[in-house]
């Protein structure tokens, strides 16, 4: 098999959808190739690209959704200091977080894409992601948050997808150029040519 970067562009909507394996891998076929797509990696890359597009278009980067009941959360002094120093960055990514005093914050809004996630878990995971708080630029930190949000928002492995969901994913993937890997660098899909398969089965 070869990675997508060695292939011509693939139009997923033009492929024949064969089925899902282990509720994680989507199998497609063309006349002379078979494609195995990792649904989490693919959706992760899709969300990441959409977040980048939105940030490029507007200074109010990501739309947010207000929580019906704000969540009050206690954190360590170092986490509190980091959150207070990252308020603009978080606001641009769709979070509304304010100081509640004494190493406590109140979470008022989350990015709309992730409104169904548990607010406290999302912030704890965010703090863990930024455990190494090196002196990165604003843009570098923003990109890292996009990677984090894409991972959190992407459909997971071991999740059954319906045929319409697969069709919608393919349509969206066709809007992303050079979709060879997820934001973490893992391949989104691999392919095997008919000749590869024939060699595997010792037909040639």
Image (cartoon, rainbow, N blue to C red):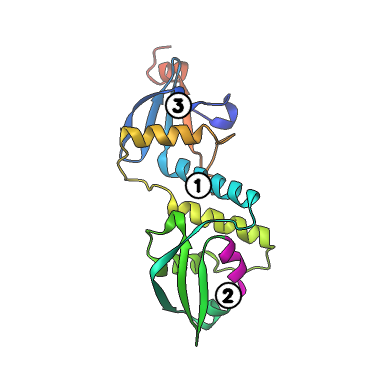
- Quote the CA–CA distance across marks 1 and 3: 18 Å
Identify the residue shown where x is 47% and y is 40%: 42
| 199 or 84: nearer the viewer | 84
**Quick check: 33 above or below 93?**
above
Identify the residue shown where x is 58% and y is 79%: 81
Identify the residue shown where x is 65% and y is 68%: 134
| 32 or 148: nearer the viewer | 148
Q: Give the SS element for disc 3.
A: helix
Q: Determine which residue is flagged by label 3.
A: 13
Q: Which of disc 3 and disc 2 is earlier in sequence?
A: 3
Marks 2 and 1 close (CB-CB < 8 Å): no
Q: Where is residue 171 in the image (x, y as percent from the top left)?
A: 46, 32
Q: Is residue 74 left or right of residue 133?
A: left
Q: Which of disc 1 and disc 2 is earlier in sequence?
A: 1
| 57 or 40: nearer the viewer | 57
Q: Name which quarter of the figure residue 82 lies in.
A: bottom right
Label 3 crowding class (10 Å Cα cut-off): few <14, some 14-19, many 20+? some
Nearest to viewer (mark 2 / mark 3)? 3
**Quick check: 5 above or below 136?**
above
Q: Where is residue 59 in the image (x, y as percent from the top left)?
A: 64, 57
Q: Determine which residue is flagged by label 2.
A: 82
Q: Main secondary structure of the magenta part?
A: helix
Q: Determine which residue is flagged by label 1.
A: 47
Q: Which of disc 3 and disc 1 is earlier in sequence?
A: 3
Which stretch appears magenta?
83-92
Residue sitting farthest toward the bottom: 102
Marks 2 and 3 close (CB-CB < 8 Å): no
So how many labels did they put on this image?
3
Q: Give the SS element for disc 1.
A: helix
Q: Where is residue 35 in the image (x, y as percent from the top left)?
A: 44, 27
Q: Name which quarter of the figure residue 119 lies in.
A: bottom left
């Amino acid at each position: 098999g070869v990675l997508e970067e060695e292939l011509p562009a693939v139009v997923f909507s033009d492929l024949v959808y064969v089925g899902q394996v282990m509720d994680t891998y989507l199998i497609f076929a063309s006349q002379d190739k078979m494609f195995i797509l990792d649904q989490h990696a693919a959706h992760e890359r899709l969300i990441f690209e959409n977040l980048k597009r939105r940030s490029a278009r507007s200074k109010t980067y990501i739309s947010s959704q207000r929580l019906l009941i704000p969540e009050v959360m206690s954190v360590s002094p170092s986490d509190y200091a980091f959150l207070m120093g990252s308020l603009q960055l978080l606001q641009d990514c769709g979070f509304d977080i304010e100081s509640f005093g004494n190493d406590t914050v109140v979470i008022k809004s989350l990015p709309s894409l992730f409104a169904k996630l548990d607010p406290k878990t999302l912030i704890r995971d965010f703090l863990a992601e930024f455990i190494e708080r090196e002196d990165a630029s604003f843009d570098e930190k923003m990109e890292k948050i996009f990677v984090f949000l894409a991972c959190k928002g992407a459909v997971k492995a071991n999740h059954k997808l319906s045929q319409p969901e697969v069709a919608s994913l393919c349509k969206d993937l066709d809007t992303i150029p050079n979709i060879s890997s997820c934001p973490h660098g893992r391949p989104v899909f691999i392919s095997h040519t008919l000749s590869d398969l024939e060699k595997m089965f010792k037909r040639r």
